[in-house]
Each structure stands twice: as structure tokens, then as C-alpha cells.
Image (cartoon, coloured by chain):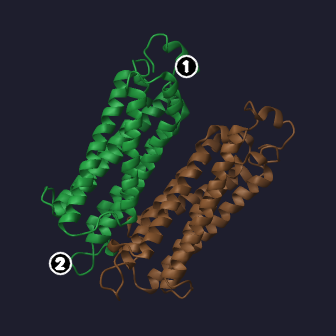
Chain colours: A green, B brown
Amino acid sequence: MKATVAFYAAYLLCLVLSVVCVVLVVHWNASYRGGFAWDHGAKQFNWHPVLMVLGLVVLYGNAAVVYRIPLTWGQNKQPWKLLHAGLLLLSLLFVVVGLCAVFDFHNANNTPNLYSLHSWVGIATTALFAAQWAAGFGTFLLPWSPMALRVLVKPTHVWMGAIIFVLSIVSCISGINEKLLFVLKKNTNGTVPYAKLPPEAVLANTLGVVIMAFGLVVLKILANQTWRRPEPGSEAGEYRSLMTDES
Amino acid sequence: MKATVAFYAAYLLCLVLSVVCVVLVVHWNASYRGGFAWDHGAKQFNWHPVLMVLGLVVLYGNAAVVYRIPLTWGQNKQPWKLLHAGLLLLSLLFVVVGLCAVFDFHNANNTPNLYSLHSWVGIATTALFAAQWAAGFGTFLLPWSPMALRVLVKPTHVWMGAIIFVLSIVSCISGINEKLLFVLKKNTNGTVPYAKLPPEAVLANTLGVVIMAFGLVVLKILANQTWRRPEPGSEAGEYRSLMTDES
């Protein structure tokens, strides 16, 4: 019971930080960066941070912890699997559109793609994420995938899931830092430089801190062994697996 | 035996990547950034990336995995504890000198300190690291610290250790990206801009990729339950604790 209360406290924090991340990244780009459009200009670029934070951090993190909710443990796992896979597919979709936003913007402005370390880490994260989703689909969702394969692949799937999340956080922090260095320069139309910490810099730095905090809460939830859904074969899962469809 | 071979393969990779990280960061700053000095100028700044990569990533990561080496499991834990604490104290020392290098450089050039997201994450990492070292010293090294306290604190110490390492990686990647954006600009003394990926950019980006790879190997070693030193009370530790001083 104590473990359950601690879990829900962590989970509530996870949900609150999710909302704060989304509010901050939308507010930053809507109020300080001119809002959104799909016009190959700066307003199209603004979709990039919003979709990456929403997809690669918030949706991804929430999808990762969905099996940890004790409320779901007595229930059939299948709908929760579909929710896990569905949230991650939506996340992947946001990431792809978020990449299109920045590639379109670069191409229209004759800016090369994929030169910064941020972009190298980001594109590697996306590639690993897409491969992880496809491998997860083939192994855990296709009904004819043998149980032995599921058991073999699961630890790697869980480990890779956490690692891709860490890579996402690294991509976001380096990306926010890069964007602020690009736009808050000295002597450009009276812009207050990043070094003087104008309100926009404080806002976007705070977004970075909240993303870090969200990441730590999600990793904490994932790491806690007592918060794992009991599976058939494990002590606690033995009884329940008689009643529910576990796979 | 199979687990031991797998561990030593991972550990060898960890050592090789450690050397590559140090070689790349020294080569970058020695060959492309003008080398090292303690003159409040750009050459003093160059100590910053070198000492941070060496201290916060390489020494820290190697100190974190020291208990995982199976060769040490049959031995008294005390010397390995001293090695763990000693490597981390050296790491902390490098980090403090690395911070002095950048603060001195900023102050001499009238550049504000601690404005970028990189610096916010970095200073938080350092503060947590110093607090973690002090708490670890008080709990695990002082001989009069009660066993009950050690048992209570250990999971948090292990967890915080891994989290501080993740924060270190985030700090390093965002810092390398920031430095390249600062120095590889258009039209400054014929410098090839970052966007055109001159050799320096490829070198420093590669350093970032190698740091990520090193981080993943260390986190993998830390996460593998079968690679943990068996402790008294655990099944495998029961027998050995009769012979060795475990605390």
C-alpha cells in the first residue's frame, strides 16, 4: 500500500510536469518566436521544438510508464499494450513531422541539414526510436510472435526504451540551448542577448530544467523494481496469470 | 562464466572509449583551439572541456563501475571503496578546476556567468555531485556510520550516482554544441562555419558521439543485475561474507 501511494505521488508529478513542459514550449514559441505556420519560414521551424518536446519527451515518457500503473495490473494486458504502442506511434508521428518542419525550413533558407552535434544526437535518437517501435510491434503485438521470442527480447526492449528516452532529453536540452544561442544575439534589432538573460531566455532555460525534472521522474518510475507489473512466472504474477491474458 | 565474459567485453569497451574520449578532447583543444594556459584568455577556457570530460565523464564513469568487476568480489571491499571514493574526489577536483577555468575566462572578458541552459544544467550537476560525494563519505567511509544507515542510503546513493552521470552527459553534449556554435561562425577571420562541417566540427561532434557511447556502456554495466557485487544477505553473498569484511 505504501509503495502504491509512493507510485501515485511520482505518477502525479509525472503528469503535472508533462503539462508544464507542453505549456512552456508552446508559450515560448507562440509568444516569443512569432507563433506557428507551415510556410518554410521561421514560424514553420517553431513546430520543431513543440513537436519534439510533445512527442519525444512527453508522449514517449508517459507511454513508457503506462505498465507501471498498479490500477491496470489486475486487468487484461492487451488494451494497455495497444495504448503503449499507440501513444508511441503518435509520438513517432510528431517526431517525423517535427523533423520535416526543420528540414523544410533549412532547405528553404539554404541552411545545411544535420551539421550540429544536436542534430547528430537527434537524428540517431529518431532512427533508434523508429527501429525500436518496429521491433516492438513485430515482437509484442503481432499475435503469431512466439512467447520464447517475447521473453528473449523484453529486457532489451525495456533497456533500449529507457536509453532512447535519455537520448531524447540530451537532444532537447542541446536543441533549446542551440536555438537560444542562434536567436538571442547582440545587436540584432535591439534583441537582448542570451548572456543578459532576457525573459525569453529564462522561460526557455526553465523549459529545459522542467524537461530534465520530467526525465528524472520517468527514469525513477522505470527503475523501481517494486513498481513493475507482475508477470506470469514471477511470484506476484503467479496467481493473477490464472485469471488474465498475460503475454 | 558467460556473464563474466560479457562483463569483461563491456568493461574493455568502457576502457577503450575512456581513452578515446580523452584523446579527442585534448586533440580538439590542443590542435584547433590553441592549446592550454592559465592566463584568463581563450587558452584558459580550453581547460574547461578537457577537465569536464576527464572528470565528470571518464573518471566518474570508471569510478561508478569499479564494484562491478568480478575479480574484486572475492576481496575485501574496503580498498575498492577507497578507490571508488578517491577516483570521485579526483573527478570532483577536476570539475572544480574546470569551473574556475571558465569563470576566470568569463570574468576577465566581462562575459556574464551562468546564463545558458548548458551552464544551468552543468552547475546543477556539479552541486548534486558535491552533495553526493559528501553524503557518500559520511555514510559509507566514516567507520562509525551505523550499518542500518548504510543499508537505508545505498539504493538512493546508487540511483543518484547514475542520475548525476546522465546529467554530466547532458552537460557535455550541450557544452560541445555551444562551443562550436560560438567559435565556428561565418566571416570571422576566414573561419569555416559550423554549418559547413569543417574538420574541427567533425572532430568535436565525434567526441560528443563517443561520450554518448561511453555513457551508454557505463549505464548498461550499472543496470545489469547479474553484474552487481553480491552483498551479505543476498544469496551469492551469504557464503563469501563469512570470509570477507563486507560493509
**Quadrant in the picture for residue B183:** bottom left
To which chain does the residue with label 2 belong?
A
- Give the number of the disc on residue B13: none
Residue at x 79% of width, y 54% of height: B79
Q: Residues within 10 Å of mark 2 (few under 14, many from 20)?
A: few
Q: Is residue B58 left or right of residue A173?
A: right
Residue A17: x percent and y percent? 35, 45
The CA distance from mark 1 to mark 2 is 64 Å
**Quadrant in the picture for residue A29:** bottom left
Is residue B236 visible in the rendered image? The answer is yes
Labels 1 and 2: the sequence-earlier one: 2
Q: Secondary structure at mark 1?
A: helix
Residue at x 37% of width, y 72% of height: B197
Residue at x 55% of width, y 15% of height: A238
The image quadrant where one finds the C terminus of chain B is top right
The image quadrant where one finds the N terminus of chain B is top right
Please state the total of marks drawn on the protein image.
Answer: 2
Q: Secondary structure at mark 2?
A: loop
Is residue B142 visible in the rendered image? The answer is no
- Give the number of the disc on residue A189: 2
Which three-letter amino acid code belongs to the residue tagged 2? Asn
Residue A1: x percent and y percent? 50, 24
Residue at x 21% of width, y 70% of height: A110
Image vertical order of residue B130 relative to residue B185, above or below: above
- Give the number of the disc on residue A236: 1
Q: Residues within 10 Å of mark 1 (few under 14, many from 20)?
A: few
Disc 1 to disc 2: CB gap under 8 Å: no
To which chain does the residue with label 1 belong?
A
Q: Nearer the viewer, residue B30 or B244?
A: B30
